[in-house]
Amino acid sequence: MSLDEVVLSLFETLDAIHRCQTDLDVAMKNGYLLMAKARYSMGTKKVGSLQYDLPSEAEALVHIDVHNDIDLPTFQVVADSPVTKTQQDVRHRKTNISADSKTITDDLSRVEDIGLKELGGGDHLVRKRDPLKWFGVLVPQPLRESQRRFSSCAELCCELATLKARLMQQQQEFMRLKKSKNDMIAN
């Protein structure tokens, strides 16, 4: 690859980074604006830091793939990360039901585990959390749209990280070719 081709690809990557950063800024701005609309419609006490869990776990899972031939990492949002619980963590309520009504207790234990799905064949259970449920059952449409905008921000951040990794690789290639050119001129 010639020095001119590397410079052209470097500027194309810079342009893509600029476009991606602009898209990220717009998505963040719209997400915050929609959250403000939801807060206005629901009231200031309904949407605030008291409604959500501060030390909560991340809602998105990012997969990093490093190609061995060019050492270029790619970042990709795989899926929403579920909350994993073991069978011991699931709370079972005490019931005062006689021993001959075993089917009723089985039905009650199934009712308690609503929203849990078995994963594999072990005792691990997975529950997908929806942060909108923290604000009530009937949340306004701007709050749902705000969640979608912020979810798209996670994908844009992964794309931006991939582009910046590519930019660093192209800068290293440019510096290597420039040094090679300067060595050729000096000799």
Image (tube, rainbow, N blue to C red):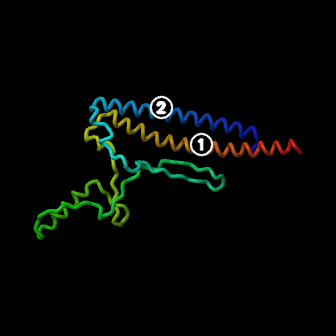
Q: Residue 49 occupies which quadrant of the picture? A: top left
Which is nearer the N-term, disc 2 or disc 1?
2
**Residue at label 1?**
164
Tell me whether the residue at label 2 lies in contact with that at label 1, contact meaning CB atoms closer than 8 angstroms.
no
Query: At numbered mark 1, what does the secondary structure look like: helix, strand or loop?
Result: helix
In the visual, does 155 lie left or right of 90? right
In this rendering, is residue 122 above or below 27?
Answer: below
In the visual, does 9 lie left or right of 86? right
Q: Residue 172 occupies which quadrant of the picture? A: top right
Q: Which three-letter amino acid code belongs to the residue tagged 2? A: Val
Q: Which three-letter amino acid code belongs to the residue tagged 1? A: Lys
Q: Position of residue 29 (x, y in %)?
A: 44, 31
Q: Position of residue 61 (x, y in %)?
A: 45, 51
In the visual, does 100 lie left or right of 187? left
Q: Position of residue 59 (x, y in %)?
A: 40, 48
- Per the rendering, the mark at residue 74 is none
In the visual, does 183 lie left or right of 36? right
**Residue at label 2?**
26
Question: Which quadrant is the N terminus positioned in?
Answer: top right
Q: Could you classify mark 1 by the number of other residues whose Cα lies within 10 Å: few (under 14), some (14-19), or many (20 or more)?
A: some
In this rendering, is residue 45 above or below 64?
Answer: above
Q: Nearer the viewer, residue 45 or 170?
A: 45
User: Outermost residue, bottom direction?
Assistant: 99
Residue at (35, 31) in percent of width and height: 36
Q: Could you classify mark 2 by the number of other residues whose Cα lies within 10 Å: few (under 14), some (14-19), or many (20 or more)?
A: some
Q: Position of residue 117 (x, y in %)?
A: 32, 58
Q: Cα distance, mark 2 to mark 1?
A: 19 Å
Question: Which quadrant is the C terminus positioned in?
Answer: top right
Residue at (36, 58) in percent of width and height: 84
Residue at (45, 34) in percent of width and height: 27
Query: At numbered mark 2, what does the secondary structure look like: helix, strand or loop?
Result: helix
